[in-house]
Image: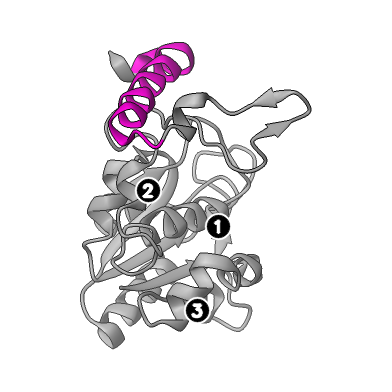
Amino acid sequence: MRVDVLTLFPGIFDGPLDQSILLKAREAGLMSVEVHDLREFAEGKHRVTDEPPFGGGGGMVMKPEPVFAGVESLKGRFGPGKVILLSPQGERLTSALARQLAEVSHLILVCGRYEGVDQRVADHLADLEVSIGDYVLTGGELPALVLIDSVARFLPGVLGDPQASSRDSFEEGLLEAPQYTRPREFRGYTVPEVLLSGDHAAIGRWRREEALRRTRLKRPDLLD
């Protein structure tokens, strides 16, 4: 998979992309991520990328020209891609959506800033708007990183255990059962005996029951 990111702040991506699973996925050639400074596609001597909004109001709005030019340049160089605008008004990022996006060979992520992006980008350029929750951040860079991380986990070979993602929370509409490891007892707190029994059928039943109990307690909306 190839991921191209258009942003006014490329430096935000340096740390997260060079650590842990994302770094290993990139080094193994399972995922390529390239971050592009949107100013490179702006016109004029000063490379202006934002202007005051028509109709008045505070803040600045990102201009459509650099975004269109950036996306068109990337498509011309690397072929067709699914254009995603990170936006609080977009479709909520879920495990199911991340799994769908993992099947796309080329993603182009557009990170908004300030008061947002000119609406013509959403209406005539983006294939999809995606939100990571019902709150507003200072820009689309952190949501883009969240999307990249969540999608990467569904790419074949990225996780050491190929079945790991299928056991995670939300994959079956439930939260994941609790996990324990050594030591067997810690400060008087012990591990449930069933996990030490070696009875895999009993462990499977316990995990299913705990997943249901957790979901009822913490996220009953998932059961609805």
85 or 212, nearer to the observer: 212
Task: Inspect the image, locate mark 3, and give the three-letter code of the amino acid beneath it.
Answer: Glu
- SS category of the residue bearing label 2: helix
Vertical arrangement, residue 127 with respect to residue 220, above or below: below
Looking at marks 2 and 3 on the same chain, the residue that comes earlier in the sequence is marked by: 3
The mark closer to the camera, 1 or 3, is: 1
Residue 56, percent from left and from top: 57, 39
> Where does the C terminus fall, quadrant-wise?
top left
The quadrant in which residue 67 appears is bottom left
- SS category of the residue bearing label 1: helix
The mark closer to the camera, 2 or 1, is: 1
Residue that label 2 marks: 119
Residue that label 3 marks: 43
Residue 183, percent from left and from top: 67, 41
Q: Which residues are magenta?
A: 198-221
Q: Is residue 201 magenta?
A: yes
Residue 161, percent from left and from top: 37, 59
Residue that label 1 marks: 141
Task: Inspect the image, locate mark 2, and give the three-letter code of the amino acid beneath it.
Answer: Gln
- Mark 1 neighbour density, 10 Å: few (under 14) some (14–19) many (20 or more): many
Q: Is residue 33 visible?
A: no
Say the numbered circle drawn on residue 50. Answer: none
* Residue that appears at 45% across and 78% down: 26
Whether residues under marks 2 and 3 lie with C-beta atoms below 8 angstroms apart, the answer is: no
* Residue that appears at 45% across and 19% down: 214
* Residue that appears at 64% across and 26% down: 190
Q: Using the numbered discs, state the Cα–Cα distance from disc 2 to disc 3 in whole angstroms.
A: 19 Å
Vertical arrangement, residue 19 with respect to residue 198, above or below: below
The mark closer to the camera, 2 or 3, is: 2
